[in-house]
Image (cartoon, rainbow, N blue to C red):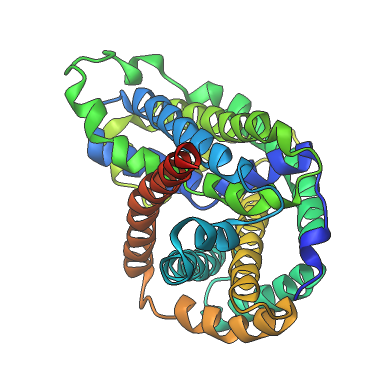
Amino acid sequence: MSKQPIDKITTPQTVVIISNFILGIGILTLPRTVTEKVKTPDGWITIILGGIIAILVAFIMVKLAGRFPGKSIFQFSKEITGKWIGAIISLCIILYYMALASFELRAMSETTRLFLLQGTPNWAIILPFIWVGLYLITGGINPIARMFEIIFPVTVLFFLLVMFLGIKVFEVDNLRPVLGMGLGPVMKGLTTTSLSFVGFEIIMIIFMFMKEPNRAMKATFIGLIIPLVFYSITFVMVVGSLTVDGVVTQTWPVLTFIRSFEIQGLLVERFDSLLLVVWIMQLFATFSVCYYAASLGLSQMFKKNINGFIYGLAPLIYIVSMVPKNINEMFEMGSMIGNFTLYFFSSVPVLLLLITLIRGKKS
């Protein structure tokens, strides 16, 4: 059995893992995906409502994990539902993290090829990232947490800088009228915004590593509030600058927004390349956690050392990442993963918690 579950992470590390996990490829496309559904400038309201729903579901997950200290969902699901049903739940989660790791790799490759390394084949970008990720996660959860602590402040500072500099092209009239068509369009976009908060379910795995598990609720809340603020500011700035019609026509509207202004006299006048470097780090961080979670799940299911599964999963993740033939198929893959997450993680933890409460009352 792997020794890695005895590793411990602090509460701030838990916060940055949750926040960084949520902030992946989604923020680069969020204004477009939300606006396509809502078709009005009120998408920021939809984002806030989606964040509130995510926080409520996350609290249920924390309550569930808190009843089984020192164990992950791969272990306590068997205790709650029995060996076979628990194994099916664990396998679904493992396959989900494998697919998400592959999607993040492919998204990282597509953005890199499009904006930084034109003409480079996908395999030449994906394979080095898999090797570096493999090297990282063999050290356990602590190196992953420390990497997140490095990436997170860089992301926050650069994000705030870019959004502040973009005020010169921002027009508040592009966000009016507020609720001009009522709440109907706002509610239509809830599914899309809920998918943007995918990642907070990692708390059911990293809870077992926390030094202060009694602070898991606070850590999860802060970890979700940070992406909620990021998403809201991004939507307001991008739609306010490009208009609703302009955002819908862009594949990567955030990058288009950053390219729409230049700051004369600074060391760097164009910020899109810098943003891509920061977000490639974000995508790599998300990939690393997914890779580790899938490997940990297999090691706990079969009660074997984790290292064998880390090496074994690498070729599988590569193969799945190469399945989409183009960027449109990649987005379809992301939508399928997001839909699975929305329905699976909003229902299964609730059912598991209800079963534990009912059995607790009976006993």
Q: Residue at x 43, y 67 (%)?
A: 92
Q: Residue at x 24, y 15 (%)?
A: 179
Residue lying at the far front of the rendered structure = 363
The N terminus lies in which quarter of the figure?
bottom right
Residue 211 horizontal/vertical position (percent): 81, 43
- Look at the image and tell me whether residue 263 can be seen: no
Q: Depth check: 313 or 126 in front?
A: 313
Up-down relation of residue 338 to residue 1 (above or below):
above
- Look at the image and tell me whether residue 153 can be seen: yes
Q: Depth check: 318 or 207 in front?
A: 207
The answer to whether residue 341 is left or right of residue 188 is right
Q: Residue at x 41, y 67 (%)?
A: 85
Q: Depth check: 363 or 13 in front?
A: 363
**Rendered image quadrant of residue 157:** top right
Residue 313 horizontal/vertical position (percent): 59, 81
Q: Depth check: 144 or 309 in front?
A: 309
**Count of picture labels:** 0
Residue 324 horizontal/vertical position (percent): 37, 75
Q: Residue at x 20, y 14 (%)?
A: 180
The answer to whether residue 191 is left or right of residue 80 is left
Residue 170 horizontal/vertical position (percent): 46, 22
